[in-house]
Structure formats: structure tokens, C-alpha cells
Image (cartoon, coloured by chain):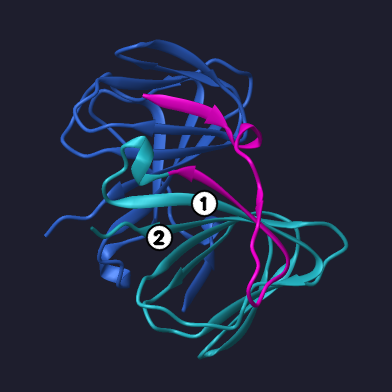
Chain colours: A blue, B cyan
Amino acid sequence: MKKMNYDEVMAKEVGKGCKGVTIRWLITKEMGAENFAMRMFEVEPEGHTPLHSHEWEHEVFVLEGEGLVMAQNGEEMLKPGDVIFMPSMEKHQFKNTGPGNLKFLCLIPIHE
Amino acid sequence: MKKMNYDEVMAKEVGKGCKGVTIRWLITKEMGAENFAMRMFEVEPEGHTPLHSHEWEHEVFVLEGEGLVMAQNGEEMLKPGDVIFMPSMEKHQFKNTGPGNLKFLCLIPIHE
């Protein structure tokens, strides 16, 4: 077993197409995970992730804050406890629309 | 995209070896997830999951409550924001040691 609190993991700035976004890699291949990785994103007020698509899916759980997610079938408001399955190749973007940080887990598959 | 709040997903009793435990299957193969599934567990005060091991790993994020996780290398206290990687085949058990419910996400791989 490996155990830590998320705040022991360094938050790194995410550049390219992002505004005010950090990522913490919580569970990784290097830690022994062979199938999927757990990351935490934190988006500052008025910040956003890029509008993009990619071959891997996302599994998201919203922890704190308010925001919205835009995808091919429109946009949805986000609040704590919300769960999102974003399929492979669907264009998407997360935005913070609230006064505090928007914090969510985002898991992705690990492929060799 | 598929989006819901966790409280829209039915909590089902988990029997065998558990005491006071429910599970919500938040993201599943049936929903289109091909690689891993997201579940939420809720453990009542004095409740616990079974002491068991299995071939699949767990990736856990603690959302609410207090508890402990027992594994082969001893036991660890749990609080919100804690992250656990439980490797395949390691014996483990989660217990609620607090006055309120212990709530955590637990993700597992999906194999064909």
C-alpha cells in the first residue's frame, strides 16, 4: 500500500492552452499503477483548461468550487459531487465560474 | 459526455464480509468506460469492508469522515484528501473509526 494526502504532492503549473491551472499527479505508473492514473486539477477563478480532444477518456469527480464543462453536446454546470465521463475523442473544456478555486480529480488510462 | 451528481446514483448494500457499507457505481463499462470504473463507498460508524485480497488494484480518494485502512505493511489513519494505491493481491480492509460516515472513491480496472 502507498498512502499520502493530496497536499503532500507538488502542484505543477499546466501551460499550453490553460489559464491558472495546476496538476498534482497522485497515483502514477512510477508508483506501480499499471492501468490508470489519478490526478487532481485546481483551476483559479476565471481560469480554464484548453478546449481540446484526445484519444484517452477522462473520469472526473468534482471536489470543490463551481464551474462548467463544455463538450460536444453542450455545456453543464459543475458543483461538488458531480461525476463526468468524457469519452475518447470528445472535445471538452473545464472553466471556473465561481469565486473560489475549482478542484477536481481526473483519471486517465495508462497505456504502454 | 455523461454527467450526473453522485447522489443521483443508487447506493446498494454490500453484503458478504461487510458491515454497514454501501456502494454507488458512478462510472461503469455499461456507460462506455472501457478501462476502469469509478465507485463510491460509504461506511457507517463502526462499519467496515472485508479483510480480503484480489487480483485487481484499488485507487482510493477519501472524501469525508475518519477511518483506517489495514494492509500488509500495517495500518494507516484516514482523513479527507487522503490517497491510497492498493496493489493487486495485497490484503486490505477499510474501517470507519469516526462519528460520521466514511466516504471514499475507489476505482478499479475493467478487464474483458
Residue B60 location (% of width, % of height): 51, 61
Q: Mark 1 points at which residue?
A: B39
Under mark 2, the amino acid is: Ile
Magenta-drawn stretch contains A55: no
Q: Give the range drawn in magenta.
A: B1-27
Task: Residue at 64% x, 72% y: name it.
Answer: B49
Q: Residues within 10 Å of mark 1 (few under 14, many from 20)?
A: some
Is residue B31 toward the left or the right of residue B91 in the image? left
Total label count? Answer: 2
- CA gap between label 2 and label 1 equals 8 Å
Pointer 2 chain: B
Observer able to see residue B39: yes
Is residue B74 toward the left or the right of residue A9 in the image? right
Q: Mark 2 points at which residue?
A: B108
Disc on res. B91: none
**B1 over A15 or under it: above or below:** above
